[in-house]
Image (cartoon, rainbow, N blue to C red):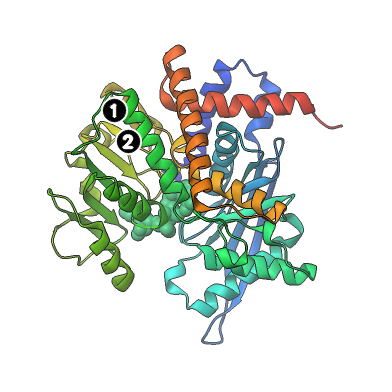
Amino acid sequence: MASENNVLKMLLSRVYKAMDLLNIKPGYKKYLCEPRKTIEVAVTVKMDNGDIDIFKGYRVQHNTNRGPAKGGIRYHPDVDIDEIKALAMIMTWKCALVNIPFGGAKGGVKVDPEKLSIRELENLTRRYTSELIPNIGPEKDIPAPDMGTNAQVMAWILDTFSIDRGYIVPGVVTGKPIALGGSQGREDATSRGCVYTILSALKVLNIDTTDLDVIIQGFGNVGSNCAKILYDLGFKVIAISDVNGGIYNKKGLDINKLLEHMSKKKTIVGFKECDSIEGSKIFELDCDILIPAALENQITIENAPKIKARIVAEGANAPTTPDADEILLDKKVFLIPDILCNAGGVTVSYFEWVQGNDAYFWSKRRVNLQLRDIMEKAFYEVYNCHKEKNIDMRTAANLIGIGRVAEAVTLRGIYP
Ligand code: NAD
């Protein structure tokens, strides 16, 4: 993303704050912040018109001390190496926070997937995968969907990897279609996890769940499923934005109708029964819960003072800048930090990996119950740490996540 808002630099400032509180020795601090492996590949694609195009692809494996590297693959025109390094590091702390046996990774291709035909998208995915084959696998590094990628993209990765091996390797990716060994409940797991943390927050804050207004930025996998789950629970989703603009209805949007509109138009814009609003303005509206579920660096020093929400639930990764954190703290906004709030996706990815390894598949009910257990346990660990140590929720989450990774690193020692 934009260098003046370098997401890696901002993340490192928070990580150092937590590492100082944990009294981690300087050498280990350096080790914890450095990715173990950084891979850059040229993704060469034959386009439909016969031209050859080359896209930059990355995979960063940040830390593998607690288990194989795990993290999504992003297709977006703004992908850059610092962003991928930051997101890989976030995955390390996130997996440790919810205590699943994975390290952290992230991948990305600098491309606008909307501008590719389906065939070009498949060619790009297969070429990117083939460049990464030596570095990925069920015991090494397991990709999953992120912005701009989905279950179909995972199916192409699985196929490319499996053709290379000569047999099907379902465990090479998670977030794949159920027909190929995907897990029940994976599609909306990130959002379901996000909602479990919001319900826990409402409980500790003694806020009654009736008649609460919600605003969501982003209407992709995370945003749309958050909207649907909250709507079904009786929350009023009053404003939503996507990359094309925003919509607002004080009385609440009909999310079922909006999903229908979305499936036809591929954007929320043009939906009837609401007013249009500039996408960036939705943060300023009166609401109880704000869910950024799009990109990094969306809550900034400029718009944080105007936020009226009582709870900010970070569905997206790194949506809030450190300056904005301070402003939200001053305003006593209750923050559910990204590594806690959106950990439901990787948690059900872990369930998918376990089910694949066992070749035994769980019911949706079991997936959702076990997801709730993990999310609630993690929420209360973070909340109690925030209360006991009198630190903010983000620092508390980092303290637990980084602390677990630091313990694993210390126990294993530095080789040789
Ligand atoms: P997605 O590609 O499915 O959807 C992204 C949404 O954001 C789209 O609706 C898009 O229009 C919107 N958007 C893009 N730029 C925007 C802008 N400037 N203003 C408003 N909206 C904008 O992506 P996703 O999988 O839903 O991921 C969203 C965020 O959640 C990312 O930060 C991702 O890293 C994080 N996340 C996703 C998962 C997952 O399981 N998909 C898990 C954990 C975290």
Picture coordinates of residue 45, whole percent (x, y): 60, 75
How many residues crowd around disc 1 within 10 Å: few (fewer than 14), some, or many (20 or more)?
some
Is residue 258 placed above or below 236 in the rendered structure?
below
Label 1, ligand 1: CB separation under 8 Å: no
For badge 2, the amino acid type reads Val
Q: Which mark is residue 312?
A: 2
What amino acid is found at the position of numbered circle 1 in the picture?
A: Val
The image position of residue 113, as x and y in percent, is: 46, 68
Does the image show residue 279?
yes
Query: Which structural element holds mark 2?
Result: strand
Do residues under tags 1 and 2 come within 8 Å of each other at their CB atoms?
yes
Report which quarter residue 127 is drawn in: bottom right
- How many marks are shown on the rendered structure? 2
Residue 228: % across, % down? 32, 53
Q: Quadrant of the C terminus?
A: top right
Residue 406 position in % (x across, y down) = 66, 26
137 sits left or right of 122 in the view: right
Position of residue 180 relative to residue 229, above or below, is below
Q: Nearer the viewer, residue 170 or 87?
A: 170
Question: Foreground: 402 or 131?
Answer: 402
Of labels 1 and 2, earlier in sequence is: 2
Residue situated furthest right in the rendering: 416
Q: Is residue 1 visible?
A: no
Image mark for residue 64: none
What residue lies at 42% left-to-right and 15% top-to-bottom?
387
- How far apart marks 1 and 2 lie (CA) works out to 7 Å
Would you name the residue on which mark 1 appears? 333
Q: Is residue 377 above or below residue 186?
A: above
Task: Please state if 161 lies on the left or on the right of 205 as rendered.
Answer: right
